[in-house]
Amino acid sequence: MFLIILLIVLGAVIYFELRFMRSRNKDYVKQVLEKDEVHNAITTTQAIASSLRQRGRDTKEAENILSLAESAYIRKDLSAAKGLAMKARDILVSLPVVAIAPIAQEAPVEQPDPERKTVQEVKKLEPHMLESRFIINSCRDRLRSCSESGMDVKEAEGHLTMAERSFEEKKYDEALKEGMKARRLLCESSSDTAEPVKDAVIVKIPKPETKCEKCSATVNSDDLFCRKCGAPIIMKRSCAHCQAEMGDGDVFCPKCGRRA
């Protein structure tokens, strides 16, 4: 009888212990997965920003936001870090598209011994690999949101499928081109579905005339010297929206705050 009672008590203890341990393990696994997801989002966006900066893109704003995301990650504020990383990614997606130059075919070289590869050779990535993967991921998220809002995304989905197939086949040039086509279609769909402004009045702002600073004669925008006195023409940079004067290094207008 005593042995039966002891077995029952032991079984109950084991049951409750396993139940509480399972719940604790689930919470721990959830925290680890969330932490890894935020870390991957930050590091991937940093790699894309570095690659775009090397190609002449202005990524200062996105890099500043990524610094804030890293600080939030160190403080273990994962939700804030993830939000900042997504914000930086959206800024990189909205950067102007630069035409892709064809990759020159290199002369075949003798393949070195795989066992003697250097660290630089191992870490070397294929051209346009990171950019194509970044464009595909961003288009997939935007395609999902556009589809949920009732937009026609069949054509963009087709280009995105071709981009994913090209990426799997390691044709990163084709994947990047198809991904940019899909992104352009999604942007056009978003702008077409926007509600028009009622009773809107279109005001055309005339372009200011460029005049010679020496003799005040009117000159064309592409003139380098005055047609009347021969003095060199100094072109001043101005905002395209409010015509305010801007410096050479200004990214935003100091008067209206819009991007130059």
Image (cartoon, helix red, strand yellow):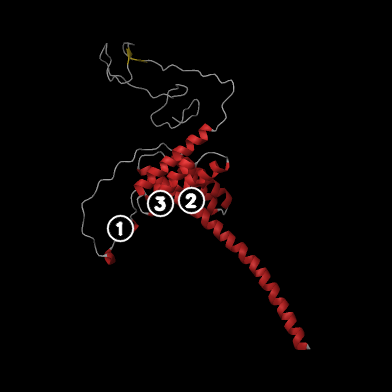
Which quadrant of the rendered structure holds the C terminus? top left
How crowded pointer 3 is (Cα within 10 Å; few <14, some 14-19, many 20+) is rated as some
- Amino acid on which disc 1 is placed: Glu
Q: Is residue 40 above or below residue 49?
A: below
* Numbered circles on residues, count: 3
Q: CA distance from mark 2 to mark 1?
A: 25 Å
Closer to the N terminus: mark 3 or mark 2? 2
Which element carries disc 2, helix, strand or loop? helix
State how far apart marks 3 and 2 are (Cα): 26 Å
Query: For the point 41% across and 23% down, which residue is it?
Result: 238
Q: Position of residue 124 (x, y in %)?
A: 33, 55
In the picture, the quarter occupied by the N terminus is bottom right
Residue 20, compared with residue 36, is above or below; it is below
The foreground one among 57 and 141 is: 141
Q: Is residue 3 left or right of residue 205?
A: right
Q: Position of residue 46 (x, y in %)?
A: 44, 48
Task: Mark 2 or mark 1: name the one nearer the start of the chain.
Answer: 2
Q: Report the disc number at residue 121.
A: 1
The residue that label 2 is drawn on is 42
